Image: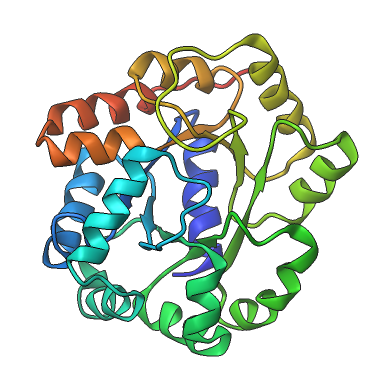
Amino acid sequence: MGKEFLEASLNNLRAKGQGIFIPYIMAGDGGLENLINQLCFLEEAGASAIEIGIPFSDPAADGPVIQEAGKRALQNGTTLSGILEVLKNERKRISIPLLFMTYFNPVLQYGLDALAEDCSKAGVDGLIIPDLPLEHKDILSPFIRDKNIALVQLASLTSSKKRLKEIAEATEGFLYAVTINGTTGAVKDFQSPVMNHLADLKTICSVPVLAGFGISTPVHVRKFLAVSDGVVVGSKIIQHLKNKRLDEIRGLAEAARYKTPVS
C-alpha cells in the first residue's frame, strides 16, 4: 500500500493501453456504515482507484451536488476520525488504491503527524488537497512522506507554463488536471483549448495525467481519453449512487476501460 502502490497500479493500466477511471464519493453520504459497500461496488464496477471525499463545512472547490452530499454526511455525524476507523477495520476488502480528497482545515485540526499515522494504518494511499498550494506543500509533505503517502497536485487551466511544469514535477501518483475554471459539477461540453491543455500536460508529466471537474457522461470520458490517461468523475457518481442508478456508473467505467495508446 502507499504511494508506490498507487503509482504502480495506475502505470500498469497506462502501460496496457487502458484508461484510468477514478470515481469520487463523499464519505458518510448515505451513512458511514455504507462506505465500505460503496467502495466495494465501485471496485467491482471497474474503478482503477477511488477518491473519498471528507465532508467539510466550507467546500470552496465543490459545486452544488458535492456540497449537498457533504451536508448530508455532516448531518449523519460523519467525522474524519470515523472515516479512518471504518477503513482501519475494513480496508482489506478493497484491493485498489484509495485517496482522500480533503481541504486543509480538517487536516490541520486533526494534526499533521496524527493524520499521516492514521492514514497509513487505514490504507490511504494518497491525499488530494485543493486549497494547499504548491508553495505550502512542505507543511505536510514531511509527515506523509515518512508514511509513504502520495500528495497529488492539481493543475489549473489558468496557470503559466512555468508553474505547470513545477506542478507536474512535484505531483505524486498522478496529476489532477482541472478541466474548467470554477467549481465541480456537470458540464455540457468541453472546448478545444481544454484538450490542448491536457495534451500539453502529457508532454511535461512523467506520471499519469487525469482530467477532472465537470466530466459526467461516457462521451466525455472517451473524449478526454484521447488526450489524457484517464478521468476523475465526482458529481455524477454521487447523483447515480443517491438515485441507485448503478448501471450508469458501470457505463462510465466501461467507457474508460478500452483506451488505446495515443501516439
Residue at position x 14%, y 28% from top?
A: 247
Q: Nearer the viewer, residue 65 or 13?
A: 65
Percent coordinates x, y for residue 2 in the rendering: 49, 69
Residue at position x 52%, y 46% from top?
A: 61
Residue at position x 32%, y 77% from top?
A: 84
Percent coordinates x, y for residue 120 in the rendering: 45, 80
**Looking at the image, how many numbered discs can be counted on the residues?**
0
Percent coordinates x, y for residue 142 in the rendering: 69, 81
Q: Quadrant of residue 210?
A: top right
Q: Quadrant of the N terminus?
A: bottom left
Colour scheme in use:
rainbow
> 148 above or below 201?
below
- Residue 263 visible in rendering: no
Q: Is residue 121 left or right of residue 262?
A: left
Percent coordinates x, y for residue 92 in the rendering: 24, 71
Q: Quadrant of residue 122?
A: bottom left
- Residue 199 visible in rendering: yes
Residue at position x 46%, y 59% from top?
A: 58
Q: Nearer the viewer, residue 112 or 117?
A: 112
> 27 above or below 18?
below
Q: Is residue 36 left or right of residue 256?
A: left
Q: Nearer the viewer, residue 63 or 230?
A: 63
Q: Is residue 61 left or right of residue 134?
A: left
Q: Is residue 86 left or right of residue 183?
A: left
> 257 above or below 109?
above
Q: Quadrant of the C terminus?
A: top right
